[in-house]
Image (tube, grey):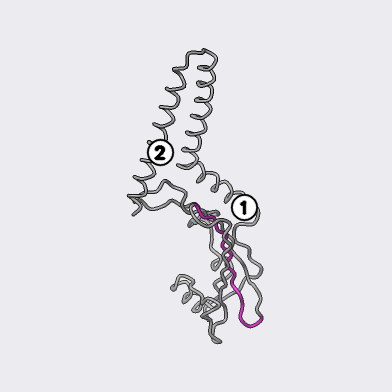
Amino acid sequence: MSGLYLLGVIALWLWLTRLMWKAWRRGRRAVNADRRRLWNALAIVAGLLWFGASFWYGGGRKYYYDWQVEKLCAKDGGVKVYETVKLPAEEYDQYAKRNWILPHITQEKSADKYYYEVDYHHYRKGNPQMTRRQAKIIRRSDGKTLGESISYSRGGGDLPGPWHESSFICPPISKDRPGLEVSIFLRGDKK
């Protein structure tokens, strides 16, 4: 389906470009020199608008939303720790082995000491989409938020086609930047 859509977009673009080219050629044949200059000026303006809109659709909007993501991320993105917790070595190792998978608030049980909550806010839906993700780790006993992680992302905005859409996340995911769980839970001594 997306391959046909891409061909349709290209065909429409080529057809409209050809139509504008023919209109310009017809206007240039005018006998009056002032009218020819007017047609040339209109053709330059229309051509700049046409190609500018084409480049915007083809990639410019992607860079615009990446810039918006970076701007929002600079305000409040990243990991914020409100309280650290020293876990016994065995418990720490158990969580680390499971890649710090804590139960979600909808799946937490009375035996779970900690759970997480995630909230998504969609600034823009569609193509491209722009989203804010806020994850919190909460202690069950007192309901206190131990820390939160806020990230912003853009997905899509590419030319349609059979390829996977691009994305942009801020702050970027990397091994150098500790995650929320590793920042909150510290390894205690073995007993």
**Label of residue 72 in the image:** 1
**Label of residue 13 in the image:** 2
Helix, strand or loop under label 1:
helix
Q: Is residue 30 left or right of residue 3?
A: right
Give the camera-side residue of 139 and 124. 124
Give x and y (percent) for residue 187.
54, 72
Give x and y (percent) for residue 20.
44, 30
Q: Residue furthest bottom?
A: 110
Give the camera-side residue of 165 and 38. 38
Distance between the alpha carbons at the discs numbered 1 and 2 = 34 Å
Going 48% across and 73% down the picture, which residue do you hit?
101
Give x and y (percent) for residue 85.
61, 74
Helix, strand or loop under label 2:
helix
Going 51% across and 77% down the picture, which residue do you hit?
103
Going 48% across and 13% down the picture, which residue do you hit?
31
Magenta segment boundaries in residue numbering: 128-142
Q: Amino acid at mark 2?
A: Trp
- On screen, residue 45 above or below 7: above
- The quadrant holding residue 181 is bottom right
Q: Main secondary structure of the magenta part?
A: strand
**Label of residue 34 in the image:** none
Q: Amino acid at mark 1?
A: Leu
